[in-house]
Image (cartoon, rainbow, N blue to C red):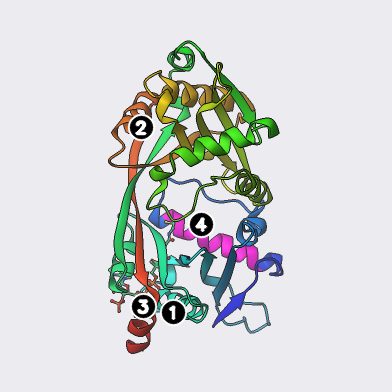
């Protein structure tokens, strides 16, 4: 029932069936999240950064008596990047607690083991069955973030306009739909590199060098995810003093994802964080009129950023945890339990 599956060549019926399962999962686990759409879903599942691979398997029900293929009831994929594998597992709510989740993790873990990977990480949403599931498989919690959601209908736009202009002298803001302009790519990558410590513990490496940054923007576009950026430029040096990135995914275009927000060390204390985020929301209001929410993830220790987000109207929603496990131990544990 579990078989390797390539989203690039999968039939449209399989993609649609996987979408149904994903939305059934969201409806029970994250009922306030918008359901996903089919738009660019195949690309979302297939496209990766250069040097990365995503391998997928699905669990499909038996065909009906008339030969119609059965629905896709579960899926696992493992993204192999650098020296770690990142796992994603879904089981349709009507099929849970029958061992399918464990079977899906086992096929992916075996492959990661064969390929020489030592560690597997996974994002686990707080207060969902996934917490007990991964803990039962020996995963341990490495890092906790809080997801917060901003409801755009509750935003005080006049106040936001003031925040967007409340920035120290010597800086100006620039809105860049689609990504940073080519002549600022180097400065943009420098700003990201300088604060790479803030990314410690995250599963995905950020883009520190210009080529990786270009690759990452290309990959986002291919996956149907539209990036928007607001930059704070330091007029005297032309350096990028701060940046904030929001992505509007074709798969859930009413809820955007806040990616990195960075204020370079020397430029802190001038109101840049608040101003760039406020300007971003003002721009999105006209660039993406169908957008109703923005979600963001922050480390609980990052008090300064949490304070600015609260001022903008973000409300904490869920814990979002990163778990990891030693691959050999995981395979051994799962094999022993069979
Ligand atoms: C986590 C998930 C994959 C588990 O799938 P599953 O098929 O139910 O898991 P299994 O039946 O293999 O469970 C294995 C073990 O995990 C633990 N477990 C799983 N669900 C549990 C629950 N709800 N409560 C307590 N323990 C649980 C149990 O120890 C279970 O063994 P047991 O049934 O013999 O006691 C499934 O709940 C799921 O798809 N969740 C959504 C995950 C996700 O990515 N969400 C993202 C959007 S929210």
Report x, y in % for residue 259: 49, 41
> How many neighbours does mark 3 have within 10 angstroms: few (below 14), some (14-19), or many (20 or more)?
many
Query: Which of labels 3 and 1 is toward the front?
Result: 3
SS category of the residue bearing label 4: helix
Determine contact: label 1, label 4, CB under 8 Å: no
The residues tagged by marks 4 and 2 sit, at their Cα atoms, a distance apart of: 31 Å
The residue carrying mark 4 is 23
Answer with mark 3 or mark 4, whichever residue precedes in sequence.
4
Cα distance in 3D space between marks 3 and 4: 28 Å
Q: Is residue 334 above or below residue 144?
A: below
Q: Nearer the viewer, residue 296 or 100?
A: 296
- Label 2 sits on a secondary structure element that is helix
Residue bearing mark 1 = 106
323 vs 186: above or below = below
Looking at the rendered structure, which numbered label has been put on residue 12?
Answer: none
Q: Which residues are magenta?
A: 14-27
Seen from the viewer's position, the closer of residues 231 and 307 is 231
Eyeballing the image, is 13 above or below 127? below
């Amino acid at each position: 029932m579990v078989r390797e599956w390539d989203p690039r060549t999968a039939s449209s019926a399989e993609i649609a069936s996987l979408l149904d399962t994903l939305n059934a999962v969201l409806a029970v686990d994250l009922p306030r999240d918008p359901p996903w759409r089919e738009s660019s879903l195949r690309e979302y599942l297939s496209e990766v950064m250069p040097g990365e691979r995503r391998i997928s398997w699905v669990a499909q029900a038996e065909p009906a008596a008339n030969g119609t293929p059965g629905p896709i009831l579960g899926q696992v994929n493992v993204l192999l990047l650098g020296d770690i594998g990142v796992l994603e597992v879904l089981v349709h709510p009507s099929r849970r607690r029958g061992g399918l989740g464990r079977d899906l993790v086992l096929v992916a873990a075996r492959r990661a083991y064969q390929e020489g990977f030592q560690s597997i990480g996974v994002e686990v949403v707080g207060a969902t069955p996934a917490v007990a599931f991964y803990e039962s498989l020996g995963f341990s919690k490495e890092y906790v973030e809080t997801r917060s959601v901003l409801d755009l209908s509750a935003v005080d736009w006049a106040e936001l306009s003031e925040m967007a202009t409340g920035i120290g002298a010597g800086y100006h803001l620039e809105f860049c739909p689609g990504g940073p302009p080519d002549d600022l790519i180097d400065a943009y990558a420098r700003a990201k590199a300088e604060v790479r410590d803030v990314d410690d513990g995250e599963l995905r490496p950020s883009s520190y060098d210009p080529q990786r940054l270009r690759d990452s923007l290309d990959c986002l576009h291919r996956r149907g995810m539209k990036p928007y950026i607001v930059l704070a430029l330091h007029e005297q040096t032309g350096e990028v003093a701060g940046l904030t990135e929001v992505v509007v995914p074709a798969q859930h275009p009413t809820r955007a994802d806040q990616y990195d927000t960075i204020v370079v060390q020397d430029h802190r204390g001038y109101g840049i964080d608040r101003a760039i985020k406020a300007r971003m929301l003002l721009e999105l209001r006209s660039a993406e009129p169908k957008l109703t929410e923005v979600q963001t993830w922050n480390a609980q220790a990052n008090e300064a950023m949490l304070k600015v987000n609260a001022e903008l109207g973000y409300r904490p929603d869920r814990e979002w945890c990163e778990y990891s496990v030693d691959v050999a131990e995981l395979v051994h544990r799962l094999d022993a339990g069979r």
